Amino acid sequence: MQTQLSPEYQNSRDGRAAEAILRKCVHCGFCTATCPSYQILGDELDSPRGRIYLLKQVLEGVEPTRKTQLHLDRCLTCRNCETTCPSGVDYGHLIDIGRKLVDAKVPRPAGESAMRWALKEGIPSPLFGPAMKVGQLVRPLLPVGLKAKVPAPQDAGQWPTRTHARKVLLLVGCVQPSMAPNINSSTARVLDAAGIQCLIAPKAGCCGAVKFHLNDQEGGLAQMRANIDAWLPLVESGQVDAIVMNASGCGVTVREYGHMLQDDSVYADKARRISELTRDLSELLPTIADGLLATYPGLQAKLKANAPTLAFHPPCSLQHGQKLKGGVEQHLGALGFSIRTATNESHLCCGSAGTYSVLQPEVAYQLRDRKLGHLAEIQADVIVSANIGCITHLQSGTSTPVQHWVEVLDRALR
């Protein structure tokens, strides 16, 4: 697609980057078949193709409006369209650029701005944990909508104390320790059982995705630099083999540190190195399985006889953002679990998408219910996923337990 940049953007880094991405676009429309917001809303401008058209207009000098902003806001950034696109269009980075350019020109209403500010400042804040504890104390009294965002208190169990020659860094995340602390401790216990030790860098925090995708891109980049500074001494000392993510949303962001900081003369090389070392927890499953089967000789027979039936929802950040498909089902199945994905629309987003379920609840809850309908056909004992946002969002619409797959594996080892 040819784009004639307006003078305003001809010497702009964002303008040139967007133009380079747009050159790959052929407007074939394959993406509309797999775009969640288009499936729900049926508006061409709420599809990747339509949003690309809007962004092309902005880059060519057409003034954006609130309507332009709304269509960009309705994108879940699930990146399903990237998996579908035959031309390899880097839509995720394009939508980030587009939102930045449009928000610079289109003021938001005061209430909307306040909500977005509260999310980007509150979620990564040290005050999030205490606030979540208060919410959990009064959870029975909360309105239904707010109650769905506050999971019941969870016992995280014991963190393993053994040391191992093989070590990995684990990002504990900004909301996961407060909302579902058992995910991190389960990860540490499972890796410990497989002969791998989890290390935590105390000064590492939010991956930067919350602020970055709410268009505080400088704030998000600052968090990325802080994480790099926290991790790099352990990486350079040779103490760790990998940086492990058990929240796939964080994983897709950290794997893109190298891209996001490529123009930073101080951090470009450091960021690229961190991205190269980052692994989703599911990528360690072959090693985990080998270690567990060596330590627990009767594990497969035990799981085949007693393990719950699992329905797996692969998060968009795992299958589309990181392009990792099939590993969880394959390796948990090899261990003895009965695990299946939905036969219909397993590629489709559940509607969580970071802060999307708060900012666009109408679309988010339709997608949640659509996803749960497909998963219900499996008649599983437990729904498992790989991202805290998906887990919380899905749990708000079903009585079937929704957990991280590592929690189920951890419980099976006891």
Image: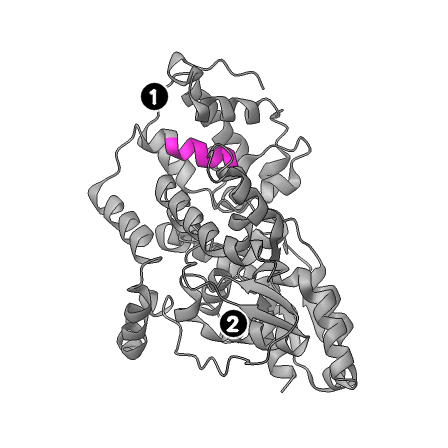
Residue at point 45% right, 61% down?
A: 173
Classify the position of the C terminus by image quarter: bottom right
Q: Is residue 390 left or right of residue 286?
A: left
Task: Tell me residue 345's x, y (percent).
Answer: 63, 54
Q: Which secondary structure is most common in the magenta stretch?
A: helix
Relative to 192, residue 50 above or below? above
| Residue 319 located left or right of residue 130 | right
Q: Quadrant of residue 142?
A: bottom left
Q: Nearer the viewer, residue 197 or 126?
A: 197
Q: Is residue 133 magenta?
A: no
Q: Nearer the viewer, residue 230 or 353?
A: 230
Instruction: Give the residues drawn in magenta, as a range.
Output: 93-100
Q: Residues within 10 Å of mark 1 (few under 14, many from 20)?
A: few
- In the rendered structure, which amino acid carries the disc numbered 1? Glu
Q: Residue at x 55, y 35 (%)?
A: 91
Q: Helix, strand, or loop for circle 1?
A: loop
Question: Which amino acid type is marked by label 2?
Answer: Ile
- Could you tell me residue 38's position as x and y percent? 51, 41
Residue 63's mark? Answer: 1
Residue 397 position within the rendered picture, expressed as x and y whole percent measured from the top left = 46, 67
